[in-house]
Image: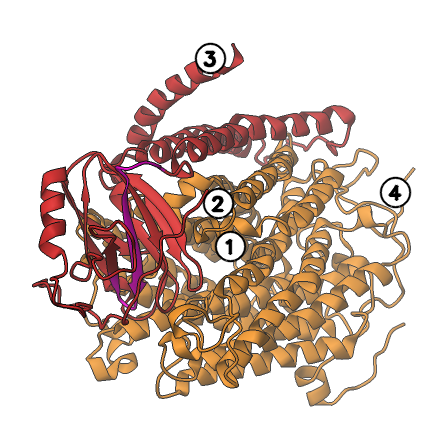
Amino acid sequence: MVKNTMQFWLKRLKKKAQKITWSAWGIWYIDPPKDVSLDGYRIDNVIQYTDTVITIYFSLVILTLIYFIFKYRARPGHKAVYDKGNTKKHVMATIAMGLLVFFSIDIVIESMSFKDLREAFWNFPKGENVVKIEVMPQQFAWNFRYAGADGIFATDDDVVPAQNQMHIPVDTPVLIQIAPFDVIHSFFIPNFRVKQDATPGMINAMWFQATETGNFEIACAELCGNGHYRMKGYLTVESQEAYEQWLSDNAPLEDDEDDWGDDWGDEDEDTQEIPEDWGWTWKEVQ
Amino acid sequence: MSEHHEQSFWAQYIFSQDHKTIGKQFLWLGLFFLLFGGFQALLIRWQLAYPEQPVPWWLFGKLLFSETAGIIDPDKYNALFTMHGTIMIFWAITPLLIGAFGNFVIPLQIGAPDMAFPKLNMISFWTMFLASIVLLASYLLPEGTAAGGWTSYPPLSTPVGGIAGEGQTLWTLALTLAGTSTMMGAINYIITVVRMRAPGMTYFKMPLTVWGLWLTSILNAIFVPVIAAGLILLLLDRTIGTQFFVAGGLATVEGGDPLLYQHVFWIFGHPEVYILILPAWGIVSDLLSVFSRKPAFGAKVTAICMSTIVVLSSIVWGHHMYTTGMSPLLGKSFMFLTLLISIPSAIFFLNWLGTMWRGNLHFDPPMLFAMAVLWVFGLGGLTGLYNATITADIYLHDTMFVVGHFHYTMAASVLFGGLAAIYFWFPKMFGKKMNPLLGKIHFWASFIPLNYVFFNMMVLGYAGHHRRIYNPSEYEFLKPIIGLNESITLFAIILGVAQFVFLFNFIYSMVKGEKAEANPWNATTLEWTLEGPIPHGNFATTPTVYNGPHEYSNPAVKDRDWIAQSEPMPT
């Protein structure tokens, strides 16, 4: 009952949120990059709910402030009321308002956020169709590794495409494990609303699922040196067939044992020397 | 008590042990670095709006970037934002709010002859001075100064991280020295407040300014040692080849952990936000009361709320690290604890409005800046909610949204609080009046562009603009924000120019300003009971405190609307 009522109001607020943010921000408002992921809407929603409620609270504060400035301005004959605001009534009123803020904003966004984490962002996909990719950022490029035919990472048949090139099939969960070679980087795809730090000594995980085909940019979000700004990756989301074709095009040749760092005809001028024999056995998590 | 002995020039002005002189020394140091850091901000803004175009002559482009014909290169750009952050936080705001006003105001407001340890106080300033020299010396190195961001996350900030030169080493050393200075100050402030209050000055009769500065000092005394430990380990990594913070492909030994540094940094770093803003909160609470001619609404509750925030601030550092891959359980706990802060914040925020309610508002420059803090801290505080939310933070972390948010809280709120304090205490510090008209011009010329700049930084971040990038036009998805980046820069320049109005007013008033009377604002706190230039030792006779700090418009007082803390209440 309580839950239904809350959901009802949340939906109404969400609709209002869209209207209010658009009209209030006017010319300032710039759309975030188009969301092409399965769960990105969750992040947009929690942001929009926060937009709405804080706009309301902030407007109330500012309207009160403006009203006070006008009503209680110093002028001949006007006097302040001697009031320390320390009676039980006053204290209770301010505490009540503090709690109101807490329960109308904080608790709501917390439950939204926890729900999204449980249902989506920390609910890692399992099963056969999951595409697994190892990502190894370095100063200042992205390296990707697919398990290849044997389905096992760090073997000779791994598919290691040209640097900065990542392909994934549409409508399929993609599970990523990420560990950098040198310093901290952060894997950021604005169109997917995802970001994950890559910290030396750790293997971190994240997942997402594309809902549209197209080309999208990958950015490094953590300062990693003077080339940080141009540490750009190219994500291609394509059909399952095109993806499989691309994988086989990039598969290592049988007699070519050492294919690390081969140039696959990529025209990106920012390629870096790849550390030898990178890649790790897939870290299985329960 | 009075010590009217003659002192040599050196003892009186340079190696002074008088808290008032040391306060002024910190004020000058802070103002110098404020201008320096602000100038760097304009260079950063120039690069973001007009990437890789020569910096114009009025920003000294050819002079500063002579090898590249006025163009800022990526290394210099990284150095710019690194030093902008470092300088603004540790060399501008800390000396201004804590060093200058902490020193000048605390002993006067609690009725003490000086700080508890005058010599330590002097050493604290000169350690800071030494730190400044070390920091500035890093600019003279051939490879330039530090460029690892103000957080200087290793391994980037270690010698294997790829930043050339020893600038980063000097940065680490300078910050350690600045921290040492802060620790000495903190110990001094805490003990002064605990031991040297005048008779009758109970804790809840202390002005909220002293409360804010005292709580800040407690946080400083506890948490600056934490960052100092981290910095010393980093310094060892940089100088003698240890690898405390190096792992992965660059490590030659096992056991280093870059994440450890982040924990250590933010265990200090989050309280640091409150270290900077608590004095501003206290000052604003008091000033709203003075200029509303009304007691601070729920002053005791405000003090308790600030203390609660001090406790909470020390257990929320993890919200800076949601994307590092730390344990989900930790993430959730940190989110909940962070959100708890909004309760005490909302309460004392309402108390500020309560102070103005049914008051008699005088809009002098200090009041304008104090009210502006309500605006900017309101926005800064509320936008913190996005960053506290784990899911929203996945998208917004390390974007310009975060930059806009913390500029609202740290830069705007603290700076406006500091400017309110300067306009308010200037007559007591220098015995002269500041020009109120210029003050009001300075206010509006700062308030409007500042909001344009910082609000739109958040809009940029929502549009996906990630932080610390040299050239946003590298990315297709950032094409729509180019126009906004340009207009932000325009307003940032206006904001910068507006500060010259302040600077002119400040220096002109000091030299040629009208002589101020002892209590120009009809304020109640003890510093305003002192006539003329305050001698070394402050009070001729130790005052006895009868009233709270906010006795305005008390009906028991007949002929005026205030009564000093040291005057017995008429019966």
Give the mark, 2 or 4, whose residue is nearer the N terminus: 2
Q: Secondary structure at mark 3?
A: helix
- Amino acid at dot 4: Met
Q: Does residue B275 appear to the left or right of A241 in the view shown?
A: right
Residue B163: x %, y % from top left = 36, 77
Query: Magenta part of the protein: which range?
Result: A125-142
Q: Which mark is residue B410?
A: 1
Contact? badges 1 and 3 (CB < 8 Å): no
Instruction: Report whether mark 2 lies on the same chain as mark 4.
Output: yes
Q: Is residue A285 above or below residue A89?
A: below
- Amino acid at dot 2: Gly
Q: Which mark is residue B32?
A: none
Which residue is disc 2 drawn over? B380
Could you tell me which chain the residue with mark 4 belongs to? B
Could you tell me which chain the residue with mark 3 belongs to? A
Residue B504: x %, y % from top left = 46, 67
Give the mark, 1 or 4, whose residue is nearer the N terminus: 1
Q: Does residue B361 appear to the left or right of B300 in the view shown?
A: left
Q: Which mark is residue A4?
A: 3
